[in-house]
Image: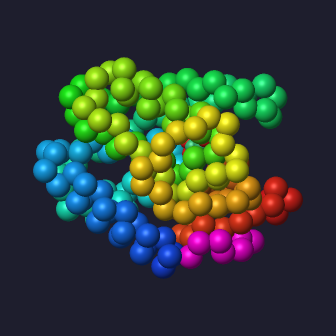
Amino acid sequence: MHNPETLISEEEIRLRVDELAARISLDYADKGELVLIGILKGSFIFLADLARRLTIPRHIEFISVASYEHGSIRSGAVRLVMDVRRSIEGRHVLVVEDIVDTGHTLHYLIDMLKTRGAASVRTCTLLHKEHKTEVDVKIDYLGFSIGDEWVVGYGLDYDEKDRTLPYIGVVQPTDY
Ligand code: PRP
């Protein structure tokens, strides 16, 4: 059993999620029900914690996307695998991600949700690898900026391993 080195502790995550939830609750205080869209699978733990700490009316949806890959190289093209259940037309939407890496996933989703007539589309991500950006996307609510390391835990996996680790840890592919 390996124990990934801690990058962001449970306590640090808890405090940051509290802050994000407070800011989001304030920003949407008079805007009616907020539609939170979690991007599977990575966001499921962050979304669960964030959603429970909001003090505003909220509705939960999920979307699943996949990246086209050529061998182990991601092409940047994204396709929808599972969609939301209800129309988001005229609704205020907050897309919730665990991590923004190249930005392709979020870029695709923001475009798609705006095309569908959302009243507004904002983004919230726990982690952002700034130096890996290939396409610029606006991140409205950010947990932590991190470097270019392999991270696992709190929803993030390495080949489906370590998703449920309670903190964000750093690993090397050779650890598995
Ligand atoms: C991760 C993450 C984002 C995406 C970000 O998902 O959850 O959705 O990659 O990468 P990008 O900014 O380069 O587009 P992943 O494909 O690992 O799937 P998972 O969430 O199901 O583990």
> Which residue ends up furthest to the bottom in the rendered image?
11
The residue located at (59%, 60%) in the rendering is 145
Q: Look at the image and tell me in which quarter the N terminus lies.
A: bottom right
- The answer to which image quadrant residue 94 occupies is top left
- Magenta residues span 1-9
- The answer to which image quadrant residue 112 occupies is top left
Name the image colouring: rainbow
The residue located at (22%, 51%) in the rendering is 28
In the rendered image, the vertical position of residue 74 relative to residue 28, given as above or below = above
Left or right placement of residue 167 versus residue 158 in this view: left
Q: Look at the image and tell me in which quarter the C terminus lies.
A: bottom right
Whether residue 14 is visible, yes or no, is: yes
- The answer to which image quadrant residue 38 occupies is top left
Marker count (numbered): 0
In the rendered image, the vertical position of residue 161 relative to residue 77, given as above or below = below
> Which residue ends up furthest to the top in the rendered image?
115
Whether residue 45 is visible, yes or no, is: no
Q: Position of residue 153 (x, y in %)?
A: 59, 62
In the rendered image, the vertical position of residue 124 relative to residue 16, given as above or below = above
Q: Is residue 2 magenta?
A: yes
The residue located at (25%, 54%) in the rendering is 27
Q: Position of residue 88 (x, y in %)?
A: 26, 29
The residue located at (56%, 35%) in the rendering is 105
Please state the quadrant of the image where ligand 1 appears.
top right
Q: Position of residue 172 (x, y in %)?
A: 81, 61
Q: Is residue 169 magenta?
A: no
In the rendered image, the vertical position of residue 64 relative to residue 30, given as above or below = above
Q: Position of residue 12 (x, y in %)?
A: 50, 76
